[in-house]
Amino acid sequence: MEVTHGSTVQLLDLPPEVIIHILSYLDFADALAVSRVNVFLRTCLTTSQELHFRLGTQLLGVTNNPHFQSDLSDRIRMLRMSGEGWANFSVDFHKTLPVLHEPFGIYDLSGGIYLMGDQDQKVLRYCRLPSSADDPMVWSRIDLDPSLTIVDVGLSIYEHDLIAVVTTKPTTANTNLLQVEVQLLEFSTGEPHPLARNPVLFVRYTFQPAASSIGLEIAGKYLALVTTPSLTETLARFCVFEWKTGVVVLDYPVKSGTYCSIVFLSPTHILLPNELTGTLDLFIVSPSNPNPPAPSLRLALPSIRSGYSIRAIYGRSEPNPAPAGFPHSTHPFHPTPEDAIAIFKMHIRNNQEESDWGDFSMFTHRSTLLRLCEEHSGGHGEKIRWEEWGPLVTRWFNAASVPWWITTATGQRSVMNMNVMRDGLEAGSSPAVLILDFNPLFVKKVLAEYGTQDSEDDSLVDGRLDVNVDPSSMETNVFKHAVKSALPYVRIIRVFADHNFDAVLMDEERLLGLTTDEEGMVRKIDVFHIGGARGDCASSSSSE
């Protein structure tokens, strides 16, 4: 191309490959606007496979996995099948797995693995969840040293092939004194993790009975852990390890009952729901300051009425930030961690009347919480009122009729289930499953195609899809004021008339319907694959 001195070069004067490169820097909304400007630009956007894939990942809120080996056309096909499957709530295949062992209360769902504890607390049982109808679905096990008692676990399957198992064992000097440790194992082999300098991390000593639960999450090089001590102890511990070296980079003693779960906002920004103060407390990992005097920031939750108290707050955002990407994954793309939704489940109870209680779920984007933290990074223990940060960027639900499970969200989607009544000859109830999609680009897409629906009509009709962009006001007897929230979302409903399960979990490919016994222990797992079975994609994959 020849350009004379003093001439002005227009965008359309550039070679097509240069124009496509420029367009690759646009996000989905801007690309959509550009496509309406000019026929040639629209052709560039619709015919370039690279642009098609990049913009498609934005629309679905996923990140390309370069460790997955396939050509671009296969990736685009799998991306389209995934988007259409979740948008239409279409099940590719269904498999059932009975639970034959006696389960213990711990469980996890991450990295394509469903894991459960065993009643004797000596063994971990897990199942690799199927991606195609031909994949087997069987229980496998990880056996630990018989002298160890398993308390809890944390998984980092796709980033590190890592399972961190929290254990206790009696000390030699006092059998009533327990030593709490974290065993760092390579998940694929069950052996000590080869990247851990010391595969056993010492956490603390505790007295019998042992801690009932320990919150543990892994992101990048950091393993964060919060203890729930025995009833005779008054102090708990929140600490962060560099798990490969065993170095403690943050250590913060807290009053027992303060924290029980952990949410990584970034590899160095960690949020902990505080049950005693009703706040979300931010800690920033800084090896130069391993003993912070207080959280860097506190985000207040809605105030509760006098005479009520928070009995539990659990938080989760899946997947965790993964600076190393997903080298141990055989999938073409994964939900973008930075854009994932964070879910917080709260249980509030009347201090005098145990039958007066409420369960609530709050959703917000991880990126929103991180932005708030960065905007107030200069503060030292600053507290931001709920009214100043929360109503516009969260969405609240009264979850009294929703089962109390935390692994119900991945990426920007979440699942809820409740029963709807059946009429006619087979009268009874069937589980209605609601997919809530908080991806703002998907919200805009559904708005453009369907518009808004009657906000007064909340019926659970099979196949219904609607979008909610209106603010809501939740009136309850436990909060001082109506809880207002306005985060837009799309809701998709499906009634499983032929099934009757008690809870529904989700990961990026599947819904898991759980059937429990009278004591709440899982006895059967129904797996519903959504978004295109791997065998339907006509491509093979392998990790590098």
Image: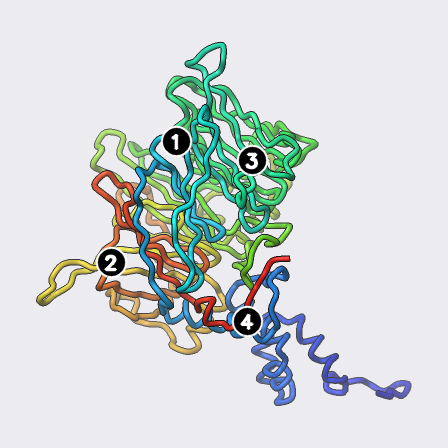
Q: Is residue 402 visible?
A: no
Say if mark 3 contacts mark 2, CB within 8 Å: no
Q: Compute the Cα span from label 3 to label 1.
A: 17 Å
Residue sitting farthest toward the top = 173
Graded by Cα atoms within 10 Å as few (under 14), some (14 to 19) or many (20 or more), the crowding at tag 1 reads some
Q: Alpha-carbon distance for marks 4 and 3?
A: 37 Å
- Along the polypeptide, which appears first: circle 3 or circle 2? 3
> Which marked residue is nearer to the observer: mark 4 or mark 3?
3
Q: Residue at x 24, y 65 (%)?
A: 459
68 to 254, vertically: above or below: below
Sequence-wise first label, 4 or 3: 4
Tag 4: amino acid: Gly
Separation of residues labelled 1 and 4 (CA atoms): 44 Å
- Residue hosting label 4: 56
- Res 8 quadrant in image: bottom right
Q: For residue 431, which numbered disc appears in the image?
A: 2
Along the horizontal axis of the image, is 391 left or right of 304? right
Is residue 178 placed above or below 159 in the rendered structure? above
Residue drawn at (12%, 65%) of the image: 423
- Report x, y in % for residue 220: 61, 45
Q: Nearer the viewer, mark 3 or mark 2?
A: 3
Q: Look at the image and tell me in which quarter the N terminus lies.
A: bottom right
Q: Which residue is mark 3?
A: 184
Q: Position of residue 472 (x, y in %)?
A: 35, 58
Residue type at numbered disc 3: Leu
